Structures are given as C-alpha cells and as structure tokens.
Image (cartoon, grey):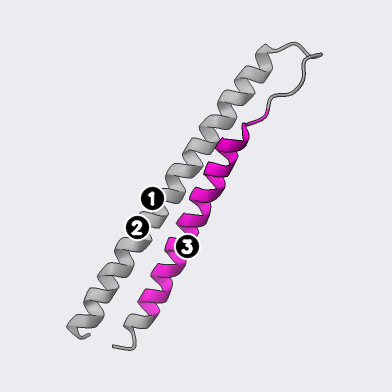
Amino acid sequence: MALPGLLINVVALSVACSGAALLFITRLKEQRAMARLAAQSEERAIDQPMLFLDVRTERAHRLAYRVGFACLGLALLVSWISTRF
C-alpha cells in the first residue's frame, strides 16, 4: 500500500473512532436519562401525569446520533477512496 493511501486510511480510522465514541457516549447518556426518568416516575402518584424527556434533550440525542452516523459514513467513504490510491 502506498503512503498516501495509508495516510488516508489513518484519517478514516480517526473519523470512525470519533464517530463510534460519540454514538457510545450518546447511548449511555440516553440510558441514564431514561433510568432517571423511570425513577422519578415511580416516586410519583398514579393520578399524576407521566414524565417525558424535555424536547432539548431529545433533540441533542438525535443530533448526536446523526453526527455519529455521519462520521461513520464519512469514514467508510474515505476508506473506500483510499483504495483508489
């Protein structure tokens, strides 16, 4: 493998690792938020309304998922491009 192809693969690997880390951290944050919400819901009386995550938190999770999957897609594309060099 030529040096330019190797360097492009290193870039693809770093983008893929950062995207995977973002997806992992977002999933952990989402699970913790849901566990906290479930704990708060158990403490409430039955006749009180249900608790939901606020809109900003849900938007932040969706955005992080989109960016993470975009990073993985970009890494795949860059890795595919590196096979041409």
Compute the Cα span from label 3 to label 1.
13 Å
Asked whether 3 or 60 is in front, the reply is 60
Q: Quadrant of residue 12?
A: bottom left
Quadrant for the N terminus in the image: bottom left
Residue depicted at 39% across the width and 80% down the height: 80
As drawn, 74 above or below 5: above
What is the crowding at mark 3: few (fewer than 14 residues within 10 Å), some, or many (at least 20)?
some
* Residue sitting at the far left: 3
Residue type for callout 1: Ala
Q: Is residue 40 shown above or below 7?
A: above
- Mark on residue 17? 2
Identity, as a three-letter code, of the amino acid under mark 3: Ala
Q: Earlier in the sequence, mark 3 or mark 2?
A: 2
Q: Which span is picked out in magenta?
A: 52-80
Q: Left or right: where does residue 56 sit relative to residue 82?
A: right
Q: Pinpoint residue 11: horizontal percent, then vertical percent.
A: 28, 68
Residue 70, numbered circle: 3
Query: Is disc 1 placed on a helix, strand or loop?
Result: helix
Which residue does the numbered mark 1 point to in the structure image? 21
- Quadrant placement of the C terminus: bottom left
C-beta proximity under 8 Å, tags 1 and 2: yes
Type of amino acid under label 2: Cys
